[in-house]
Image (cartoon, rainbow, N blue to C red):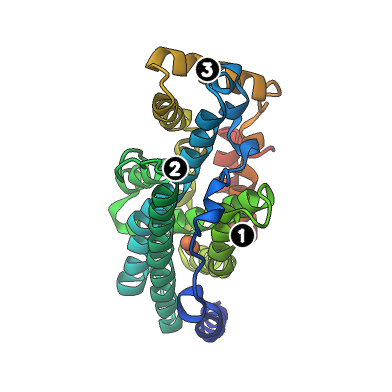
Amino acid sequence: MANDLSTFSQRYLVQWDKRATVRTMPRYRLSESAASHDFFPAALQPLATHEAVIARGKDALHELLVRSAYGWQEAIATIEVDVVTDLCGKLANQGIGVPLPDAARQVALTIGTDEVYHAYAAREFIADVHRHTGIRPEEPGQSESPIQKALAYVQREAPPELRRQAETMVLCFAEHFVTEGLFGMSKDTTSDNPFHITIREHLIDEGRHQNFFQHLMRHMWAQIDEEARAALGRLMPGFLDIFLLNMDLYTDDQVRLLGFLGFGREDSRRIIAETFMIGNSEKPASKDKVLHAQHCLSLLRIAGVLDHHPTRDVMIESGWIKP
Ligand SMILES: [Fe+2]
Ligand SMILES: [Fe+2]
């Protein structure tokens, strides 16, 4: 098993040299003529369909979509640095509490390099859009993301001797989730849309990352002992609840967004409630039907985690998987 990860990581390092965007290609820069795009796919911003929002006119709608694109790019910039790069640095320097091949530690450093570069490109995109549209973005740090909250939960609740393993589990989830999220995003935009182009560029690296983290999760899960598996398994439902079911953070962001269009707090909350009630007429009947839950559950399947009976049991009890 350690050999598997070592061989995979050595191959990965060769590929990184040849393909990583930070090493091999000039990045896309937004031109003035491209700045009239809406950037963000209207299909992914349901507020754009609410009549009160539509009644504010074309410019307001444009601003809503531009600000939604800012929100996404800002979330990328924050999560890539504060969560992914930080945990990749720990992976390289502190390991994961079980033997980890040197090549895998080096891969962690390449991923940290990619991610800081992605954050750089995301902030540059925001600045370019601002320059060409005059729509001023918010200061960084206005919103907290569910993955940051979920990581804090795991760091608080994990037994101290398993902290590195627990953090690594979060890292594998985050990278699996981000990649699938970006894939979904690029599907819903046209290929000449500047937002689409930046997401495609980002994905060139993320497919490779995702593959590494699947190997890493499987490697770690196979190496840890029974007691550690049971302890990590017990953390999973709480982690997934905070990571995937946290609607409050999302609502706060949307309230701030509507504030820019001139809506007060109360009106904003009403618009959000009406929009998402309409959009969610088929409310998920169970947690495994929640948006993106399947991406996280597929990681657990691929890594062999759900073959562990006590973990499978807590996942069933908490409603994340069906018996
Ligand atoms: Fe990234
Ligand atoms: Fe990544």
The local crowd at label 1, few if under 14, some if 14 to 19, many if 20 or more residues have their Cα within 10 Å, is some
The percent coordinates of residue 183 (x first, y second) are: 63, 54
Q: Residue furthest front?
A: 33
* Residue beneath the point at 44% across and 63% down: 118
Closest to the observer, 143 or 126: 126
Closest to the observer, 309 or 170: 170
Kindly state the secondary structure of the residue where label 1 is placed: loop
CA gap, disc 3 to disc 1?
43 Å
Closest to the observer, 305 or 21: 21
* Residue beneath the point at 31% across and 46% down: 140
Question: What's under tag 3, amino acid-wise?
Answer: Ile
The percent coordinates of residue 73 (x first, y second) are: 45, 50
Residue under label 2, please give it.
71
Residue under label 1, please give it.
304
User: In the image, is residue 320 above or below residue 230?
Assistant: above
Closest to the observer, 1 or 248: 248
User: In the image, is residue 115 above or below residue 2?
Assistant: above
* Residue beneath the point at 58% across and 68% down: 204
